[in-house]
Image (cartoon, coloured by chain):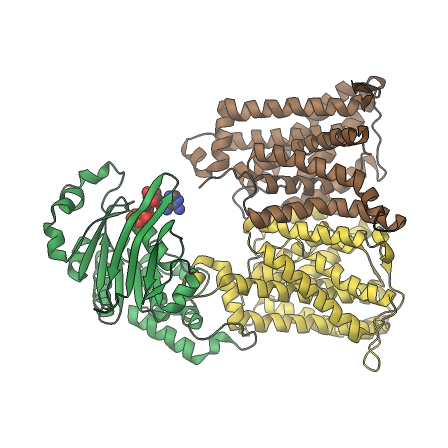
Chain colours: A brown, B green, C yellow
């Protein structure tokens, strides 16, 4: 029972992390109609920046803030130099160009930080378990990820639903021509949104860094998951991304935690322990396939016709 | 009396809150040229799309040659002999004119699960396509890419494509939209020819052409039929005059104009 | 195909002649390396050509095409591991399983459009990847070594470098010829018509879905053949050949060479893989150059190399 609660919390934590990644992706996708495979690279860069800056400053919080700023700048620079020339091109061109960027970033990281991964140690105050319920302890760091991510999600919600920029963002996601007609400085809006997305990806990366090792290619697996989420949620929909992310996070985590035991009941021990992670990874894709077959536009499409 | 070729009963189609087709019934007997007029946004294109299967109605039925086709997909309707031209030109842009027409002929010449022979060398398909192009006056432009044809030529090609499917009923959605004076005149001459052979439903804003060509006219406003009669009667029809023909400002509140 | 004397046709002719003559050069100079490299390139060219059939001609942007490389490869590998070494069994099975997989995922994926199609094909390929990782009996994550290449008794010896090279080349030319026939056939025109304007094709009487699905299955089957060749070439098959970046590589080859041009994928495969080879000899960090290069190609060289060479005509 305690295990289930803990795994549910882990799932929630992972889902929220995925949401940070997916939110940027779905905004960029929804507003600019831009498929950005390099989003995962920004996540990776966030993690590397964090590992580096925390090492330099000797402060986890300060390092994290610096890393966030660095990813934001990197994202804006990337948009400015390369990606803005790809708006309005077909998705295939975008997929290809940003695929090239993934190759670039991976080797760039290898050149700068070397092929071995980095570790980002946590400060002592984040490693102690917190008692949630009598007898239920949960790592402070994971708890703080949940809190930070929820705060960011709430802020994002307020920005998108309550501010002028948010109004433009929503208008853009459901009707691209309209923001043009409103005479908004679209270039600036796009750069801002892209920067925001990059910062969110960086935040996800740097928060994930202490849990996993910081390594090359860490952005790719999770990028695909983020894509799965925005497709399930409906492209351009923040709400859809939020719900789908939590759903996917929980399913993925529970699958990994409990599938091996379930499988051991039918398979031999060794077979079960190799099959389980693979099957739980598959679960997500299966989910997406089912959603797409039944609702080809996702569960919460932003564009209503 | 024989069954009409096309019979529409109580057709309803909504887009969100808008009733684009409002309990519409219509009969088109074989051999008739039936014009449909009405201000922009009246639901003419929506009606045609439901007849040819690009859109499905919310309720009501469509019968063609005595057969209920309400739920058939558009390719099946094409096989039965319904052909349409699109108001907004819809052609294969990166194909030549003759390829566009030959494909239409191919669609009605057995299945196309043939993987080996060169389709562009099939004599009878090419001949049929050339004949249809000839008919609309595009023979000289057969090997030109559609994207390089003028707007007027593309409108004519739309018609040639429809003809090549050997239809029984032609549904033409504003074939003269955007045509110049001489091009329009050519189109009218062509339609006069075609009406001898085909049953035609013609959506058109050019009133002169409509009144010259039509056997009967249906007037559509807000998705509803407000009149359906011979041209002379329509000209005299009070409600039509009020809503549409005489005082054009009467329709501007709907955001549309006649054009 | 009209035989016109222009730059791209000349390049294609020279490349094809060079490919045919390469083993002679290799034997004369003792340069085995180049033969090995070109064998690999040819196999990927076949895979890319099959992707071009659906992507370039059919407008179906599949991001999961590498799955068939793995499926074809695993069919060969698993049968070999179970002591069924005959190619006469292995290869038909490889093709049949690829076709079946294409039929299943195609019938589901083709209900979606645009980005959703890109993502759902990707998802299915990832599923195949994870299934392969779960095959603990056949190596799981680490992959499966094939100790004996497919045998075609009395016909051809796949362990002979030159014979295997010509087999691959034959498959490639055969594949391209097949695609050429298909593209110009009734079927091919319909598929290209649907790419151009699906609504129009439905309206003139074509059930588009069936034609697209058939095309999807044909392409998957051809790529399954490439997978069987690849497994024999490397004597090894692993989930990694199905990873999504592999599908990305195939897309790059197609687009680099020129989408919707018959020999484009071959040229693209040669340029991409040779470049990768050269760059990686010159620097360990070859992707630092390759990545931005891709970006530049997308930005400035639409239509790929074949497009640059001055022929954009399809078919
Ligand atoms: N796909 C659609 N989605 C939403 N509304 C539509 C759609 N197509 C047409 N409409 C609406 O239905 C009404 C009829 O449109 P239409 O059939 O194009 O008129 P017409 O062809 O007579 O000008 C209009 O109010 C139009 O805005
Ligand atoms: Mg209209």
At x 81%, y 75%, the residue is: C163
Q: Is residue A134 above or below residue C269?
A: above
Of residue B41 and residue C152, the one placed in the foreground of this image is: B41
- In the rendered image, the quadrant that contains the C terminus of chain A is top left
- In the rendered image, the quadrant that contains the N terminus of chain A is top right
Q: Is residue C260 visible?
A: no
At x 81%, y 56%, the residue is: C238
Total marks drawn? 0
Of residue A116 and residue A19, the one placed in the foreground of this image is: A19
Q: Is residue C293 above or below residue C74?
A: above
Q: Is residue B64 left or right of residue A284?
A: left
Q: Is residue A294 above or below residue C223?
A: above
Q: Is residue B117 visible?
A: yes
Rendering coords of residue B126 (x, y %):
41, 76
Q: Is residue C238 left or right of residue C68?
A: right
Give the quarter of the image for residue B247.
top left
Rendering coords of residue A13 (x, y %):
72, 29
Rendering coords of residue B72 (x, y %):
42, 61
Q: Is residue C216 above or below residue A98?
A: below
Rendering coords of residue B248 (x, y %):
17, 41
Of residue A138 and residue B95, the one placed in the foreground of this image is: A138
At x 58%, y 53%, the residue is: C301
Of residue A57 and residue B258, the one placed in the foreground of this image is: B258
Q: Going by the picture, which residue comes out furthest to the top?
A: A125
Give the quarter of the image for residue C170.
bottom right
């Amino acid at each position: 029972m305690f295990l289930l609660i803990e795994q549910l919390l882990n799932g929630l934590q992972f889902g929220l992390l995925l949401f940070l990644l997916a939110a940027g992706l779905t905004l960029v996708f929804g507003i600019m109609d831009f498929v950005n495979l390099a989003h995962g690279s920004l996540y990776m860069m966030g993690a590397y920046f964090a590992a580096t800056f925390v090492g330099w400053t000797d402060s986890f919080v300060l390092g994290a803030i610096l890393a966030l700023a660095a990813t934001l700048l990197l994202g804006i620079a990337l948009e400015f130099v390369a990606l803005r020339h790809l708006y309005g091109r077909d998705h295939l061109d975008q997929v290809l160009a940003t695929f090239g960027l993934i190759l670039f970033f991976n080797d760039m990281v290898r050149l700068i930080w070397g092929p071995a991964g980095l570790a980002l140690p946590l400060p002592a105050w984040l490693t102690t378990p917190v008692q949630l319920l009598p007898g239920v302890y949960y790592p402070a760091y994971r708890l703080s990820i949940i809190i930070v991510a929820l705060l960011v999600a709430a802020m994002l919600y307020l920005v998108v639903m309550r501010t002028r920029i948010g109004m433009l963002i929503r208008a853009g996601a459901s009707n691209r021509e309209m923001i043009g007609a409103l005479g908004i400085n679209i270039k600036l809006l796009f750069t801002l949104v892209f920067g925001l997305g990059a910062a969110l990806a960086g935040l996800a990366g740097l928060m994930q860094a202490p849990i996993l090792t910081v390594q090359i290619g860490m952005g790719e697996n999770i990028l695909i998951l983020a894509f799965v989420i925005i497709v399930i949620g409906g492209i351009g929909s923040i709400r859809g991304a939020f719900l789908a992310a939590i759903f996917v996070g929980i399913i993925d985590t529970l699958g990994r935690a409990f599938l091996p035991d379930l499988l051991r009941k039918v398979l031999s021990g060794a077979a079960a322990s190799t099959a389980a992670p693979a099957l739980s990874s598959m679960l997500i894709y299966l989910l997406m396939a089912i959603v797409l077959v039944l609702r080809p536009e996702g569960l919460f499409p932003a564009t209503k016709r | 009396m024989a069954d009409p070729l096309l019979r529409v009963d109580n057709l309803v189609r909504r887009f969100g809150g808008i009733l684009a087709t409002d309990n519409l019934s219509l009969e088109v007997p074989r051999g008739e040229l039936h014009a449909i007029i009405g201000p922009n946004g009246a639901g003419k294109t929506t009606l045609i799309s439901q007849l040819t299967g690009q859109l499905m109605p919310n309720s009501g039925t469509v019968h063609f040659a005595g057969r209920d086709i309400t739920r058939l997909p558009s390719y099946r309707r094409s096989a039965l002999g319904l052909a349409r031209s699109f108001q907004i030109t819809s052609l294969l842009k990166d194909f030549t004119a003759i390829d566009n027409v030959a494909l239409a002929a191919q669609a009605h010449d057995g299945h196309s699960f043939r993987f080996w022979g060169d389709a562009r060398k099939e004599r009878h398909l090419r001949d049929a396509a050339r004949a249809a192009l000839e008919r609309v006056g595009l023979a000289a432009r057969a090997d030109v890419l559609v994207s390089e044809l003028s707007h007027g030529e593309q409108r004519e090609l739309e018609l040639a494509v429809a003809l090549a499917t050997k239809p029984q009923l032609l549904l033409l959605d504003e074939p003269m939209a955007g045509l110049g004076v001489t091009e329009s005149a050519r189109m009218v001459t062509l339609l006069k020819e075609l009406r001898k052979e085909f049953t035609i439903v013609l959506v058109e804003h050019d009133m002169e052409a409509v009144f010259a060509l039509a056997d009967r006219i249906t007037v559509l406003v807000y998705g509803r039929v407000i009149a359906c009669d011979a041209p002379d009667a329509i000209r005299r029809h009070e409600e039509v005059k009020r809503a549409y023909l005489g005082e054009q400002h009467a329709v501007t509140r709907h955001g549309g104009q006649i054009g | 195909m009209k035989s016109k004397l222009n730059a791209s046709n000349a390049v294609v002719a020279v490349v094809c002649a060079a490919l045919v003559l390469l083993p002679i050069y290799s034997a004369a100079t003792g340069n085995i390396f180049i033969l090995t490299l070109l064998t690999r390139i040819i196999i990927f060219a076949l895979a890319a050509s099959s992707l071009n059939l659906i992507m370039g001609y059919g407008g179906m942007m599949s991001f999961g095409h590498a799955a068939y490389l793995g499926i074809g490869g695993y069919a060969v590998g698993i049968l070999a591991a179970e002591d069924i070494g005959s190619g006469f069994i292995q290869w038909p099975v490889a093709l049949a399983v690829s076709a079946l997989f294409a039929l299943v995922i195609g019938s589901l994926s083709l209900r979606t459009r645009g980005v959703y199609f890109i993502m759902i094909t990707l998802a299915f390929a990832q599923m195949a990847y994870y299934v392969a990782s779960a095959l603990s009996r056949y190596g799981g994550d680490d992959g499966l070594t094939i100790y004996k290449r497919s045998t075609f008794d009395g016909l051809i010896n796949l362990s002979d470098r030159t014979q295997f090279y010509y087999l691959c080349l034959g498959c490639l030319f055969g594949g391209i010829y097949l695609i050429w026939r298909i593209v110009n056939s009734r079927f091919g025109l319909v598929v290209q018509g649907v790419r151009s304007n699906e609504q129009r094709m439905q309206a003139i009487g074509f059930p588009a879905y069936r034609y697209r699905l058939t095309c999807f299955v044909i392409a998957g089957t051809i790529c399954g053949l490439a997978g069987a060749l690849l497994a024999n070439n490397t004597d090894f098959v692993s989930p990694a050949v199905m990873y999504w970046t592999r599908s990305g590589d195939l897309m790059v080859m197609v687009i680099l060479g020129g989408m919707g041009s018959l020999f484009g994928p071959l040229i693209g495969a040669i340029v991409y893989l040779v470049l990768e080879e050269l760059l990686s000899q010159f620097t360990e960090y070859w992707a630092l150059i390759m990545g931005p290069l891709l970006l530049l190609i997308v930005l400035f060289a639409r239509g790929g190399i074949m497009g640059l060479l001055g022929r954009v005509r399809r078919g």
